[in-house]
Every structure is written in C-alpha cells, then in structure tokens.
C-alpha cells in the first residue's frame, strides 16, 4: 500500500449525508486515503454509496475492523483497504486473499513483527502516543528497520515532523487533520484549508 501522501484520514461518527461532500473536499485538498470506522452509524452504507465517486489514485477504506466477520462486511461494502486496531491474523489472511491492502494494528514488538510476518502492508502502531509517540517509533525501528510502521494516536501538527524523522512510513489522523470544530460545524471550506495545511507540513 503505497500512499502518495502518507496520511490516512480517520473518520468516526460522521453522518452519512455529509460524508460524500467531506470525501470530495478531502481528496481535492490532496489527501490520498480516507478510512471510515466500522463503528460509525451506517458505515457500510456510506462506503457502498461513496465508493463509485472515489477518484482514480484515491482510496476509501474501512477501519476498526476487529474480527473476521467485520472484515467480510467491509469487503462486501466495497472497502478499498482495511485497518484494524488489534492484531488478528485471520483478518490479515482474509484481506490478502481478497487482494486488499491491510493496515494491521499492533503495539508490542512481538505484535509488530507478527503482523508484518503475516503479510500486513503497514503495521499500525496504536495507541502510539500513549507509549512515547515518535520515541517509541524510533525504538521499534531499531530492530525492525524493514517494517513499514503507521503511527496512530496522538499525532498533531506539533509533532508530525518528529514521527517521520523517527521512521514512520505513514500516520493515521482524525481531528488534527480535519479540525474538530470544522467537522462539528460541517464547514467544508475550513476542512479543505485544514487538510491542505496538514499535508503541507509533511
């Protein structure tokens, strides 16, 4: 899973009627990948309806895929990649069999290596901020310099550069990317500005 812009925009709890516009604005602002979490109300229908409108070179995936059943539902809805918060080897195997990129959740060194060995395209280190953020990514990259790590949890404009200097291949971001206030107010113009500004800092 090669991302032109190494940021996965995470959207949880966004209303289905607003998502299409939000997706269009985010992609137009330069974002490459958007993730709708499975525990968003109507998540599968959101992906099913918006998938045909995804521009070439962009990706609409589903996250918070915690088990095999949810992975199957995400694929049926049309997800273009899967993201899990936890390490589930069955989910990784299913995604690979379906030909979809999988960003597999892990936290400990053992989990990180197991996820990579099972075939994860990216290993999602989550919750990264709780274990030292960039410093933890740097420590993991010591023995695992061949593993592509995606840092998720606690990323902001203030520490974004540190994560990439530490060796992160990508980051997963929600309110720090879109702007919590802009999301609440459904301010598409401000969301576009926020996304552009975040990407500019990479």
Image (spheres, helix red, strand yellow):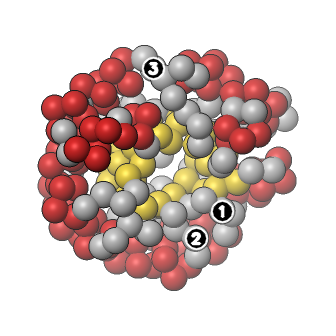
Q: Residue at x 58, y 22 (%)?
A: 159
Q: Earlier in the sequence, mark 3 or mark 2?
A: 2
Quadrant of the rendered image containing residue 197: top left
- Which residue lies most toward the bottom here? 69
Q: Residues within 10 Å of mark 2 (few under 14, many from 20)?
A: some
- Given contact means CB atoms under 8 Å apart, are the residues at marks 3 and 2 in contact? no
Left or right: where 18 falls relative to 60: left
x%, y% of residue 150?
A: 59, 41
Name the secondary structure under disc 2: loop
Task: Please report whichever mark, 2 or 1, sits nearer to the chain's N-terminal start.
Answer: 2
Marks 3/2: CA distance?
Answer: 30 Å
- Mark 2 and mark 1 residues within 8 Å of each other at the beta carbon: yes
> Is residue 163 visible to us here?
yes
Q: On the rendered structure, is 125 left or right of 180?
A: right
In the image, which disc is placed on residue 66?
2
Q: Where is residue 29 drawn, in percent x and y?
A: 23, 30
The residue sitting at 52% across, 68% down in the picture is 65
Q: Nearer the viewer, residue 187 or 59?
A: 187
* 5, 182: nearer the viewer: 182
Q: Are marks 1 and 3 in contact (CB under 8 Å)?
A: no
- Circle nearer the N terminus (1, 3): 1
Q: Which residue is mark 1?
A: 86
Residue under pointer 3: 202
Residue 138 visible in the shown view: no
């Amino acid at each position: 899973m090669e991302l032109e812009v190494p940021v996965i925009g995470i959207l949880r709890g966004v209303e289905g009627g607003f998502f299409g516009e939000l997706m269009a604005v985010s992609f137009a602002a330069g974002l490459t990948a958007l993730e709708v979490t499975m525990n968003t109300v109507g998540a599968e229908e959101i992906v099913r309806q918006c998938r045909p409108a995804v521009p070439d070179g962009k990706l609409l995936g589903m996250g918070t895929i915690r088990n095999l059943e949810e992975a199957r539902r995400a694929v049926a809805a049309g997800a273009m990649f899967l993201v899990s918060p936890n390490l589930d080897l069955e989910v990784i195997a299913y995604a690979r069999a379906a030909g979809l990129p999988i960003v597999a959740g892990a936290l400990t060194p053992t989990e990180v290596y197991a996820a990579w060995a099972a075939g994860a395209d990216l290993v999602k280190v989550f919750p990264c901020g709780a274990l030292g953020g960039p410093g933890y990514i740097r420590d993991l990259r010591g023995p695992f310099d061949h593993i592509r790590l995606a840092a998720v949890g606690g990323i902001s404009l203030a520490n974004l550069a540190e994560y990439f200097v530490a060796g992160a291949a990508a980051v997963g971001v929600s309110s720090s990317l879109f702007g919590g206030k802009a999301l609440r107010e459904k301010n598409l113009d401000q969301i576009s500005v926020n996304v552009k500004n975040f990407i500019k800092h990479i």
